[in-house]
Image: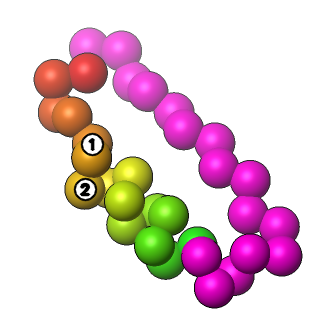
Amino acid sequence: MPKLSVVVPLHNVAPYAPTTLGSLARNADPDI
């Protein structure tokens, strides 16, 4: 199965990083 990489630029947005990364993790589709 191919893997999918997501690159999220996080420069000077430390307050938003946990929310953004948590959202990506919750929306991960195991069928991709």
- x and y, in percent, of residue 12 in the image: 83, 76
Task: Identify residue type, mark 1.
Answer: Ala
Marks 2/1 in contact by CB < 8 Å: the verdict is yes
Element type at mark 1: loop
- x and y, in percent, of residue 26 in the image: 25, 56
25 lies left or right of 21: left
Quadrant of image for the N terminus: top left
- x and y, in percent, of residue 23 in the image: 37, 59
Magenta: main secondary structure: loop
Query: Of the numbered discs in the image, which one, if any, rests on residue 26?
Result: 2
- Label 2: few (<14), some (14–19) or many (≥20) C-alpha neighbours in 10 Å: few
- Label 1: few (<14), some (14–19) or many (≥20) C-alpha neighbours in 10 Å: few
Q: Residue furthest right?
A: 12
Splitting the image into 4 quarters, where does residue 3 fall?
A: top left
Range shown magenta: 1-16
- x and y, in percent, of residue 28 in the image: 27, 42
Residue drawn at (73%, 63%) of the image: 10
